[in-house]
Image: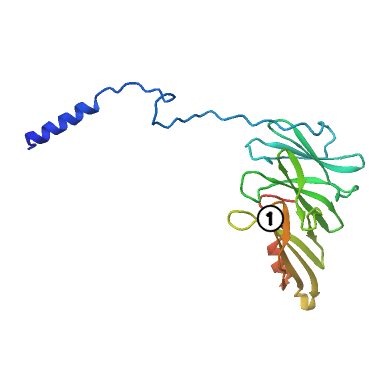
C-alpha cells in the first residue's frame, strides 16, 4: 500500500512534468548552445591546365580530402609527361614529371592515403625496364600538385619487379597504425645448388616526413625463393600494378 505522502509526491511530480514550457528561440536565448547544420562550401581551385582528350591514363583519387572524387590523368605533351588533376570542386593543377621516361608508359595506379587524413597521395608508374617498373608519388596541397621527394629533393622513385636472378619491391606502411613509409628491398641470386635457390639482399625503409622520404638503416638478410614470393614485389594498400 502506498502512503499518503508518497502518493502526494508522485502526483506532484506528474503535474510538474506536464507543464508547458514557453517556446525558446535558440538564436536569441542566452546560456544555450547554438548549433548549425550549415557548412561553408569549399572554394574551387584555380584552373592551371586546360582539359584535354589526350590523357593516356585516368583514375579517380580524392587528393584534397573533401569527399569528392578528383580526376587524375597522365598526358604526354610538349615532349614530356605531365600529371594533371581536375578537382571535383572545380579547378585544375598540372605537374611536369621531369624524371618520367619520354618513351615509356606513364600511368596512374591510384591513391595511397599515407597520413590517414582522407587526402590520398597519387601513385604512378614513371618508367620501367625489361623486368622492373619505377613507382613515384605525388600529392595535392593548396590546389597545387607536387612530387614526394628524397632528402636531396629529387623525385622519390622505387623499383618494383623480378627476374630469374633478381627481386625488387616495395612495402608501404600507413598511419596511424605505423609511421608512414615505403620499404624498398633488393635481392639477388647467390646460390642455386640442388634447386634450393637463395637470395641475398636488404630491406631499406624510407619514412615519410611531410613530403620527404627520409632513409633509415637497412637490414641485410638471405631469403629463399619461396620466402620472396610470399612477400611479393608490390604491397601498397589497395594499389595494384
Count of numbered marks = 1
Q: Quadrant of residue 218?
A: bottom right
Measured as percent of width and height from the top left, residue 114 is found at: 66, 51
Q: Is residue 165 left or right of residue 239?
A: right
Q: Which residue is mark 1?
A: 209
Quarter of the view holding residue 213: bottom right
Residue in view at x 80 percent, y 75 percent: 190
Outermost residue to the front: 30
Placement of 30 over or under 129, stated as above or below: above
Between 90 and 53, the residue placed more toward the observer is 90
Q: In the rendered image, which quarter contains the N terminus?
A: top left
Task: Give the vertical position of 17 relative to 98 (above or below).
Answer: above
Which residue is more in the foreground, 225 or 56? Answer: 56
Name the residue located 76 percent from the left edge and 34 percent from the top edge. Answer: 92
Helix or strand or loop: what does disc 1 sit on?
Answer: strand
The chosen color scheme is: rainbow
At 81% across and 66% down in the image, what residue appears? Answer: 166
Q: Residue furthest right?
A: 79
Q: In front: 78, or 102? A: 78
Instruction: Give percent across and percent down for residue 233.
Output: 74, 60
Image coords of residue 179 (percent x, y) = 63, 58
Decide if residue 89 is on the left or right side of residue 13: right
Task: Using the image as rendered, state which of residue 232 and residue 48 is in the foreground.
Answer: 48
Residue 134, position as x, y percentages in the image: 81, 54
Mark 1 crowdedness (10 Å alpha carbons): few <14, some 14-19, many ≥20: some
Q: Is residue 18 above or below residue 166?
A: above
Amino acid at each position: 500500500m502506498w502512503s499518503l505522502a508518497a502518493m502526494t509526491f508522485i502526483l506532484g511530480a506528474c503535474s510538474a512534468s506536464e507543464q508547458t514550457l514557453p517556446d525558446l528561440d535558440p538564436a536569441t536565448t542566452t546560456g544555450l548552445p547554438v548549433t548549425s547544420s550549415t557548412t561553408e562550401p569549399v572554394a574551387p581551385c584555380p584552373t592551371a591546365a586546360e582539359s584535354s582528350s589526350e590523357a593516356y591514363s585516368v583514375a579517380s583519387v580524392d587528393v584534397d580530402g573533401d569527399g569528392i572524387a578528383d580526376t587524375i590523368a597522365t598526358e604526354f605533351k610538349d615532349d614530356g609527361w605531365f600529371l594533371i588533376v581536375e578537382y571535383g570542386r572545380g579547378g585544375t593543377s598540372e605537374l611536369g614529371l621531369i624524371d618520367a621516361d619520354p618513351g615509356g608508359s606513364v600511368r596512374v595506379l591510384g591513391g595511397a592515403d599515407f597520413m590517414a587524413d582522407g587526402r590520398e597521395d597519387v601513385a604512378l608508374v614513371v618508367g620501367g625496364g625489361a623486368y622492373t617498373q619505377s613507382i613515384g608519388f605525388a600529392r595535392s596541397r593548396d590546389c597545387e600538385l607536387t612530387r614526394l621527394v628524397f632528402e636531396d629533393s629529387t623525385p622519390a622513385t622505387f623499383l618494383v619487379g623480378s627476374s630469374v636472378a633478381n627481386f625488387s619491391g616495395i612495402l608501404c606502411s600507413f598511419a596511424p597504425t605505423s609511421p608512414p613509409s615505403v620499404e624498398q628491398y633488393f635481392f639477388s641470386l647467390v646460390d642455386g645448388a640442388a634447386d634450393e635457390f637463395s637470395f641475398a639482399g636488404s630491406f631499406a625503409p624510407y619514412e615519410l616526413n611531410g613530403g620527404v622520404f627520409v632513409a633509415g638503416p637497412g637490414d641485410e638478410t638471405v631469403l629463399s625463393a619461396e620466402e620472396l614470393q610470399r612477400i611479393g614485389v608490390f604491397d601498397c594498400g589497395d594499389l595494384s600494378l
